[in-house]
């Protein structure tokens, strides 16, 4: 007789769901880790909090001693209106967005073409060219500012969007990042696509790039943030407020005669909101993209 048949008088085995295991109690090391993380959270998050709160404070709250952490005199939304009326902030905000998008698209495009050539195309001295590209990352920005400025001046591009974007359409970091991501794909995949009649550009756009979306997103976010926060180069090549970026505009809100910290903080909040949202919603792409080429 099969063992599945129960003998008379014997109870059927229990089919109840297993009970959940209790959570382990926090140990001393775990509590210490939480306290350290909480400390750094407050240390990093407090300036952001005070920037948002200070943007709706009046001079009395900001200059109070001890410092006020909440607008006791009411929310001064007039700070945002005054900031928009003092300088062409909307125009400068649009200049920053346009400049950052052009630089981001340019760097992603040039980086993916260079990385594809370094990984899949037959090339002499491949290692030498890659090392040369990496060496460009070690050149200080200050060393190339004057040659770039003279180039823009000779071609009459000062105070224009090409002057803001042309020197930054390619970067060694993007080539390095995409090269490492492309090297994680087996070369047999490229050879099989070529045998099936797929061109190099078709393999890049139809196979390689869709599989490298986290790395592309990480590179795009990093490039956008780098371009958005540029200050010295836009200050050097722009001459009118209508062509300046928002990073330059918020410095013009300061006045030695009548300094209003709330007005400056309002302009700063308008400048950091796009980057803050980009970091919040794109953080997982940054982590996945920067670690995507570490494992095969």
Image (cartoon, rainbow, N blue to C red):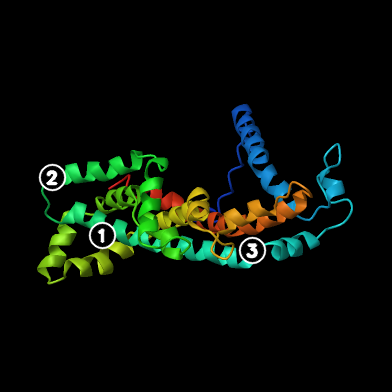
Is residue 47 or residue 294 the one in the foreground? 47
Judged from the image, the secondary structure of the residue bearing numbered disc 2 is loop
Per the image, the residue denoted by label 2 is: 125
Residue 54 numbered mark, or none: none
Camera sees residue 33:
yes
Residue 189 is left or right of residue 271, and the answer is left
Q: Is residue 207 above or below residue 253?
A: below
Per the image, the residue denoted by label 3 is: 89
Camera sees residue 3:
no
Residue 110: percent from left, percent from top: 30, 59
Is residue 84 or residue 153 the one in the foreground? 153
Other-residue count near label 1 (Cα within 10 Å), few / some / many at <14 / 14–19 / ≥20: some
Numbered marks: total: 3
Residue 81: percent from left, percent from top: 75, 65
N-terminal of the pair, mark 2 or mark 1, is 1
How far is mark 2 from mark 1, CA to CA? 17 Å
Q: Are marks 1 and 3 in contact (CB under 8 Å)?
A: no
The residue positioned 64% from the left and 51% from the top of the image is: 251
Q: Are marks 2 and 1 in contact (CB under 8 Å)?
A: no
Per the image, the residue denoted by label 1 is: 113
Is residue 245 or residue 268 the one in the foreground? 245
């Amino acid at each position: 007789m099969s063992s599945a048949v129960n003998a008379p008088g014997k109870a059927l085995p229990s089919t109840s769901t297993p009970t959940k295991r209790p959570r382990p109690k926090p140990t001393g090391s775990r509590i210490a880790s939480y306290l350290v993380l909480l400390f750094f959270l407050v240390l990093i998050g407090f300036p952001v909090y005070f920037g948002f709160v200070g943007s709706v404070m009046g001079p009395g709250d900001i200059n109070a001693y001890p410092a006020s952490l909440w607008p006791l005199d009411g929310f001064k939304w007039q700070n945002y209106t005054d900031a928009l009326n003092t300088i062409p902030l909307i125009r400068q905000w649009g200049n920053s967005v346009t400049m950052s998008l052009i630089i981001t698209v340019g760097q992603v495009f040039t980086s993916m073409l260079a990385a594809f050539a370094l990984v899949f195309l037959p090339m002499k001295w491949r290692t030498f060219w890659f090392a040369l590209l990496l060496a460009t990352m070690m050149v200080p920005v200050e060393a190339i500012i004057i040659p770039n400025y003279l180039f823009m001046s000779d071609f009459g591009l000062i105070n224009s969007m090409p002057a803001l974007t042309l020197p930054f359409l390619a970067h060694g970091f993007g080539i390095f990042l995409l090269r490492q991501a492309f090297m994680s794909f087996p070369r047999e995949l490229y050879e099989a696509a070529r045998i099936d009649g797929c061109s190099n550009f078709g393999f890049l756009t139809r196979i390689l790039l869709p599989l490298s979306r986290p790395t592309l997103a990480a590179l795009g976010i990093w490039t956008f943030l780098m371009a958005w926060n540029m200050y010295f180069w836009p200050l050097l090549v722009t001459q009118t407020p209508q062509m300046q970026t928002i990073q330059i505009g918020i410095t013009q809100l300061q006045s030695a005669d009548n300094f209003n910290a709330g007005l400056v903080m309002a302009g700063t909040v308008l400048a950091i909101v796009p980057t803050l949202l980009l970091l919040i919603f794109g953080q997982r792409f940054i982590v996945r993209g920067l670690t995507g080429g570490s494992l095969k």
